[in-house]
Amino acid sequence: KKNKRDFNRAISHYQQACQLMPTSVVDLLGMSFCFAQVGDLERAISVCKTELADKAAKQLLTDYLGNLYIQANQYDKAEALFEEMLIDGKIDAPPHLAFWMANS
């Protein structure tokens, strides 16, 4: 399929970009998204587990990681991840997450 081939090409470009700037949240999120689009949720999840010192960048990756866990039907991991981050004060709850957790 054309779309999958395009996503695979994009993954290659994101991997090259991440070698040059390993803490670029834009490139990490893009690569994770592309892995998810080709059905490789495990690699998408792995990319989102990249350690970042910047709080805002880490919040973006953590939010997307939680969404990937939900896509992969790993609801317990999604809930545990967000609860841990909220308790530790590492992130603020995104509005859609607070709604999901309140209704789960």
Image (spheres, rainbow, N blue to C red):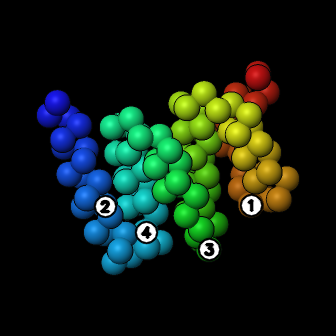
Vertical arrangement, residue 97 with respect to residue 47, above or below = above
Q: Is residue 22 left or right of residue 62?
A: left
Q: Secondary structure at mark 3?
A: loop
Residue assigned mark 4:
24
Residue assigned mark 3:
53
Q: Disc 3 or 2, which lies upstream in sequence? A: 2
Picture quarter containing residue 6? Answer: top left
| Kind of residue at badge 1 | Lys
Graded by Cα atoms within 10 Å as few (under 14), some (14 to 19) or many (20 or more), the crowding at tag 1 reads some
| Kind of residue at badge 2 | Tyr
Q: Is residue 58 visible?
A: yes
The picture places residue 36, in percent across and down from the top left corner, at 41, 40
Residue assigned mark 1:
90
Whole-angstrom CA distance, mark 1 to mark 4, is: 19 Å
The residue sitting at 18% across, 41% down in the picture is 5
Graded by Cα atoms within 10 Å as few (under 14), some (14 to 19) or many (20 or more), the crowding at tag 3 reads few
The residue sitting at 68% across, 39% down in the picture is 78
Graded by Cα atoms within 10 Å as few (under 14), some (14 to 19) or many (20 or more), the crowding at tag 2 reads many
The picture places residue 18, in percent across and down from the top left corner, at 37, 69
Mark toward the viewer: 1 or 2: 2
Q: Disc 4 or 3, which lies upstream in sequence? A: 4
Picture quarter containing residue 50? Answer: bottom right
Q: Is residue 75 left or right of residue 35?
A: right
Mark toward the viewer: 4 or 2: 2
Mark toward the viewer: 3 or 2: 2
| Kind of residue at badge 4 | Ser
| Kind of residue at badge 3 | Ala
Whole-angstrom CA distance, mark 1 to mark 2, is: 26 Å
Residue assigned mark 2:
14
